[in-house]
Amino acid sequence: MIYILAVFLPPLALLLNGQIFSTVLNFAMIVPCILLGLAFPVLWLVPSAHAVIAISMSRENRRHREIVNAIERHGPPPGWRS
């Protein structure tokens, strides 16, 4: 659901995902992309693409941290590097 929001309202999606700096950067990116998007319409996709990629990377980071924490707490899985 957050990805749909990232496509249509990128700064709001980044803010709800807890990425304050990316929200400010995305909002600052929207202004020139709208103005230059009149000549190059593909630029309208740049803020949305930034939001989707930032959210995806954040979620991947979170998953990685959870796996590392689980390995640190419980040890590696049985049969790992036997």
Image (tube, rainbow, N blue to C red):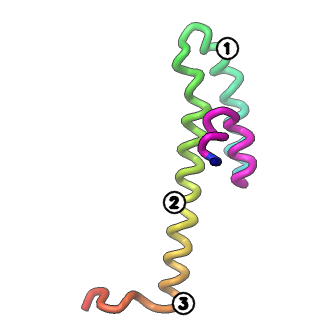
Q: Where, quadrant-wise, is the C terminus in this rendering?
A: bottom left
- In the image, is residue 3 above or below residue 76? above
Judged from the image, the secondary structure of the residue bearing numbered disc 1 is helix
Distance of label 1 from label 2 (alpha carbons)? 33 Å
Task: Give the prevailing secondary structure in the magenta stretch.
Answer: helix
- Is residue 71 highlighted in magenta? no
- In the image, is residue 20 above or below residue 36? below
Q: Is label 1 in contact with label 3 (beta carbons under 8 Å)?
A: no
Picture quadrant of residue 77: bottom left
Q: Which amino acid is tagged 2?
A: Glu
The residue lying at 66 percent from left, 20 percent from top is: 32
* Label 1 Cα neighbours within 10 Å, binned few <14 / some 14-19 / many ≥20: few
Q: What is the number of the mark on residue 35?
A: 1
* Label 3 Cα neighbours within 10 Å, binned few <14 / some 14-19 / many ≥20: few
Instruction: Give how far across and how far down residue 14 sits, in percent.
Output: 69, 46
Earlier in the chain: of badge 1 and badge 2, it is 1
Distance of label 3 from label 2 (alpha carbons)? 20 Å
Distance of label 1 from label 3 (alpha carbons)? 51 Å
User: Badge 2 is on which residue?
Assistant: 60
Q: What is the number of the mark on residue 73?
A: 3
Instruction: Give how far across and how far down residue 24 sits, in percent.
Output: 74, 39
- In the image, is residue 25 above or below residue 68? above
The residue lying at 53 percent from left, 53 percent from top is: 57
- The extreme top residue here reads 39
* Label 2 Cα neighbours within 10 Å, binned few <14 / some 14-19 / many ≥20: few
Look at the image and give the residue range highlighted in magenta.
3-18
Left or right? Give the position of 33 relative to 40: right
Q: Which amino acid is tagged 3?
A: Arg
Judged from the image, the secondary structure of the residue bearing numbered disc 2 is helix
Earlier in the chain: of badge 1 and badge 3, it is 1
The residue lying at 57 percent from left, 7 percent from top is: 39
